Image: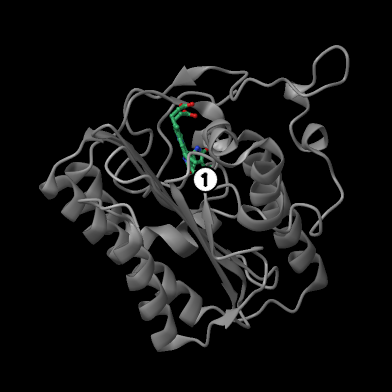
Amino acid sequence: MAASPFSYQKFVSFALEEAQRSMDLIPLPLQQCKCKKAMDGKTELGMLSFRTPKIRLLRSLTIDGGESMQVLDFGIFPEPEFDLPIFCANFFTASGMNIVVLDLNPLHDVINESKYREKYYSSLMPLGQKYAELLPWGEKITSESVRFFSPIVVWSKFTSSQCKHDTLYAAFMDYFKAWLELVDKASAENDASMITHNREAQHKYLTWRAEKDPGFPLLSRLVGESYAKDVVRKFLFNGVDALGSKSFIDYFPEYQREDGTINKKRSVIGKSFQTRPWNAKGEFIGNDLR
Ligand code: BLA
């Protein structure tokens, strides 16, 4: 193992231990191997995945490049019987710079559907407010990403320090515990049309992330393009080829180029949102997202 002063391993250990307290995690054999060495011969990828009766997929990817790079991609996708948010922790640390997204990504539209927003986020606003101050809003972000975020999203960029990393760990633990409480309280939907609605919303989310993951170019450099594609479609966003049959262009027609192919840009709208576009009540106060 490369010696590194800082790693995301303890985040993963915390989450798995915390989850085990309230649910039985059943290992999934998704990853070809739990640990893979990158082509540089030193960077290590760690992959774990589990399910529970309420959770379709809990998976974690860590990339340990020693002092030069540390990555965590931790995501949890509920079964379609639940309209629960998707747990999302994406932390990228390289050369002392950090890019972090921590959120309970909404399954449904929290900008226009106030009922869904209130169901899950009203009680969590104080938590969001706390970390919005400690981990201030990152640079401008694209409208496309904002659509997938909740009013309590932590979107931040900062230079590494012990204090900031401790704060990020505290935020991760608090968000994870808050999410576990939501799962604990949730009961399965019986209405077939609601289940279909949830499944399609999750498929749209998976389709977006599998196509536009900002980590893909880096992952390709580390393990080669074809292995990276498998990691993205079969592991990180597993379900993208099974939960629905719509294509990326079906969901996001604005990305279609004249020859029918997908526009490779991450955003067709561009960057906006210099500041947090939600107020303390969780209401959207940004401009029109289109
Ligand atoms: C950058 N990652 C980013 C950025 C965001 C995210 C918003 C800033 C650039 C941008 O606005 O696109 C993350 N974006 C998200 C998330 C959602 C979203 C979580 O829309 C959810 C809906 N990041 C990873 C992994 C790697 C990684 C696994 O999760 C590496 C293997 C790297 N992220 C990474 C890098 C950058 C980045 C290198 C900066 C480079 C760039 O912006 O292209």
**Secondary element type, mark 1:** loop
Residue farthest along the top direction in this orientation:
258
Residue name at image x 61 percent, y 52 percent: 108
Nearer the observer, 157 or 190: 157
Residue name at image x 32 percent, y 52 percent: 2
The C terminus is located in which quarter?
top right
Q: Is residue 158 above or below residue 110?
A: above
Nearer the observer, 237 or 178: 237
Q: Position of residue 287 (x, y in %)?
A: 47, 23
Q: Is residue 130 above or below residue 226?
A: below
- Asked whether, in this view, residue 241 is left or right of residue 49, the answer is right
Residue name at image x 43 percent, y 84 percent: 20
Residue name at image x 48 percent, y 39 percent: 40
- In the rendered picture of this protein, how many numbered marks are placed on residues? 1
Q: Is residue 273 above or below residue 59?
A: above
Q: Residues within 10 Å of mark 1 (few under 14, many from 20)?
A: some
- Residue 272 in view here: yes
Quadrant for residue 224, please give it: top right
Q: Position of residue 252 (x, y in %)?
A: 74, 32
Q: Is mark 1 within 8 Å of ligand 1?
A: no
Q: Position of residue 235 (x, y in %)?
A: 65, 57
Under mark 1, the amino acid is Ala
Q: Is residue 138 above or below residue 203?
A: above
Quadrant for residue 14, please give it: bottom left
Quadrant for residue 112, please give it: top right
The residue pinned by badge 1 equals 38
Q: Position of residue 47 (x, y in %)?
A: 53, 61
- Residue 87 in view here: no
The N terminus is located in which quarter?
bottom left
